[in-house]
Image: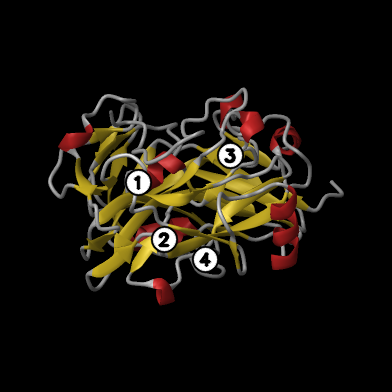
């Protein structure tokens, strides 16, 4: 392929046909998203003593032999317990050509469940980053943080995006794009990406977010819309335009801005920066082409913020900048957009919990 940028769904299907991406059993059509591929859990989960990276020159299997405590069969479903770390071989594997690299991330529902999910590879020295030329298996490190979860082989907790070269928009390019097609509501803050802020003064009522309860039942990931939110989440309400984040607590909040990802672009939530406060925002970082785009039925889509506070209580105030979106060019416009002709759960969203809750 003579391409530059993030590869679209039609390219992913070609890569599957060419054996660049392979799997057993075969990859399903519904795994292919506009700018990413969903990855499936295999049949065995390894409970390990601690999170790890394979390290240069070392396969993950060798590290599992060092850290494995016991194995869990996922064929018929099994509970992954809160606070434990598991490594699960994925069904997919890669044989990347030179120049084609990949980045992985948790899916939206995974992040909203505070289900820390990261991809590791043989010889890997970073989570979620796969260098060009990588030929080997993929693994998911899964650590439930707020809720124990029931998972099964074949479920999709994370996703992978492929790119040729560097296609990140400069501040000047981002400013020009926003002038042609507004990317956020209001006046943008553009600095190494598009800044977004937290909404703590909703237009209706005083509900600004949710905090995960510390002692709950198990969440079966296949049960969509089955769990009463009140059994798992505490409502966060305020009329003051600020809240205090508790150390160790997990919150679901929402951006003040409505976000748009035009059809020829993709975006990723930038890493958390310690200088903005004692918290991390957004574990699930991919925004597909068409998210929030009016032509794809998404006008007014907000960014849901998955927030965990760290060492000290922290005052979060309305309108505070909490993160940034980094935009990239697509190598080609996808043949289907987010929310258009595909089952997209969060198009047109506001403050919204994971799809398992009602």
* 275 vs 255, nearest the viewer: 255
Q: How many marks?
A: 4
* Picture residue at 70% right of the left edge, 61% below the top: 175
Q: Can you identify the residue that label 3 sits on?
A: 291
User: In this picture, is 340 found above or below 65?
Assistant: above
Give me the disc on residue 77.
none
First in residue order: circle 3 vs circle 1: 1
User: In this picture, is 159 found above or below 277?
Assistant: above
The x, y position of residue 216, in whole percent, is: 15, 41
Residue neighbourhood size for the residue with mark 4, other residues' Cα within 10 Å, grouped as few (<14), some (14–19), many (≥20): some
Q: Can you identify the residue that label 2 sits on?
A: 319
* 47 vs 103, nearest the viewer: 103
Q: Can you identify the residue that label 4 sits on?
A: 126
Between tags 4 and 1, which lies in front?
1
Q: CA distance from mark 4 to mark 3?
A: 28 Å
* 44 vs 214, nearest the viewer: 214
Q: Can you identify the residue that label 1 sits on?
A: 202
Residue neighbourhood size for the residue with mark 3, other residues' Cα within 10 Å, grouped as few (<14), some (14–19), many (≥20): many
Query: Which secondary structure lies at badge 4?
Result: loop
The x, y position of residue 25, in whole percent, is: 54, 28
Between tags 3 and 1, which lies in front?
1
First in residue order: circle 4 vs circle 1: 4
Query: Which secondary structure lies at badge 1?
Result: loop
Residue neighbourhood size for the residue with mark 1, other residues' Cα within 10 Å, grouped as few (<14), some (14–19), many (≥20): some
């Amino acid at each position: 392929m003579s391409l530059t940028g993030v590869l679209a769904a039609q390219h992913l299907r070609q890569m599957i046909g060419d054996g660049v991406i392979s799997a057993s059993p075969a990859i399903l059509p519904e795994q292919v998203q506009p700018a990413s591929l969903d990855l499936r859990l295999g049949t065995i989960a390894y409970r390990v003593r601690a999170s790890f990276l394979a390290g240069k020159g070392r396969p993950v299997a060798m590290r599992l032999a060092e850290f494995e405590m016991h194995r869990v069969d996922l064929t018929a479903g099994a509970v992954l317990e809160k606070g434990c770390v598991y490594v699960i071989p994925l069904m997919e594997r890669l044989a990347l050509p030179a120049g084609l690299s990949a980045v992985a991330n948790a899916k939206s529902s995974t992040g909203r469940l505070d289900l820390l999910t990261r991809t590791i590879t043989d010889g890997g020295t970073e989570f979620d980053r796969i260098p060009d030329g990588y030929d080997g298996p993929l693994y998911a490190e899964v650590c439930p943080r707020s809720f124990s979860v029931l998972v099964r082989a074949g479920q999709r907790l994370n996703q992978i995006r492929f790119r040729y070269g560097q296609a990140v928009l400069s501040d000047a390019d981002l400013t020009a794009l926003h002038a042609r097609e507004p990317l956020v509501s209001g006046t943008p803050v553009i600095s190494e990406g598009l800044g977004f802020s937290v909404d703590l003064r909703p237009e209706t009522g005083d509900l600004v977010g949710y905090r995960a309860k510390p002692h709950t039942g198990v969440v079966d990931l296949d049960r969509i819309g089955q769990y009463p939110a009140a059994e798992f989440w505490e409502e966060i309400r305020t009329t003051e335009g600020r809240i205090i984040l508790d150390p160790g607590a997990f919150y679901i909040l929402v951006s003040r801005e409505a976000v748009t990802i035009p059809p020829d672009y993709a975006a990723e939530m930038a890493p958390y920066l310690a200088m903005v406060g004692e918290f991390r925002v957004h574990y699930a970082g991919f925004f597909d082409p068409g998210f929030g785009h009016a032509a794809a039925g998404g006008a007014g889509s907000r960014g849901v913020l998955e927030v965990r506070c760290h060492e000290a209580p922290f005052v979060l105030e309305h309108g505070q900048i909490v993160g940034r979106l980094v935009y990239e060019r697509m190598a080609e416009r996808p043949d289907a957009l987010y929310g258009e002709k595909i089952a997209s759960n969060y198009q047109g969203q506001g403050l919204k919990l994971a799809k398992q809750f009602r």
